[in-house]
Image (cartoon, grey):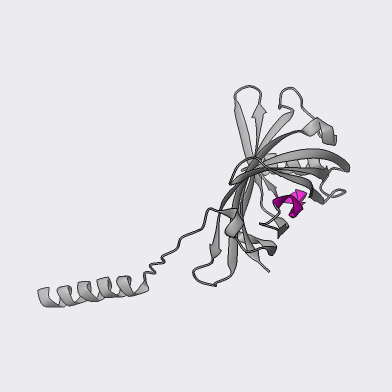
Amino acid sequence: MLNLFRVGLALLLLSSCTAARVVTHRVNPDPIEAPGGRYHLDPDHRVLLFRVGHLGYTKVVGRFDDLDAVLDFNPADPAASTLSVEIDTASADLGSAALDKAASELFDAGEFPAARYESRSITLTGPRSGKIDGVLTLHGHSVPVALDVTFNGGAPDPLTRQNKLGFSAHGVLSRSDFGLGDWVPAVKNEVAFEIEAEFGQS
């Protein structure tokens, strides 16, 4: 019986080692060396989070679950790069059915189902950082919104060999600028947002 147990344990360990994938991967943090061209947002590796103060007690944290983006990346001339983003306003997720319903009503998602962001200019602020000045169209209002962006790295995907780029970004906006000032000042007017985005080359 003991020998049978040992054989079974050995087989289990062997199968675990066989199933495990060891992926050696290294990204290049220099954006100048990344391949240029058109990139699309990877739907499995992106998040758009937002935070807004609630009654002075805490910050409500939510995210948009449905978004897409296209990046035309020019490493030789970053200012010539462009970014276009589309967000499904009905996909706001604040962690509870009541808050999700309130957000959908606030955004008037039935009448304004999509928010769009279009870059207007890109300025380098460091070797791996930059500022995107663009226009966000939300709830029927188009307002300038800036993004502070960090280039995390680029490399071919170790599994698909597709060229990938990764970025982190953050910014703030005033929701009243978009006609979304309900519940101010109990719910703060200023909304902070964070983005983590991985792009794959088309």
The image quarter in which residue 73 lies: bottom right
Identified at 70% across, 58% down, the residue is: 74
Report x, y in % for residue 69: 72, 57
At 86% from the left and 41% from the top, the residue drawn is 142
Against 159, residue 29 (above or below) is above
Query: Can you see residue 85?
Result: no
- 26 with respect to 67 (left or right): left
Q: Position of residue 198 (x, y in %)?
A: 60, 57
What residue sits 63% from the left and 34% below the top? 60
Residue 74 visible in the shown view = yes
Q: Which contiguous range is marked in magenta?
A: 78-91
Q: Nearer the viewer, residue 97 or 155?
A: 155
- Outermost front residue: 76
Relative side of 164 to 98, left or right: left
The number of numbered badges drawn on the structure is 0
The one nearer the camera, 137 or 15, is 137
Quadrant where the N terminus sits is bottom left
Asked if residue 62 lies in the magenta stretch, the reply is no
Location of residue 105 with respect to 16 vertically, above or below: above
Q: Is residue 84 rendered magenta in the image?
A: yes
Where is residue 93? Give x, y as percent.
66, 46
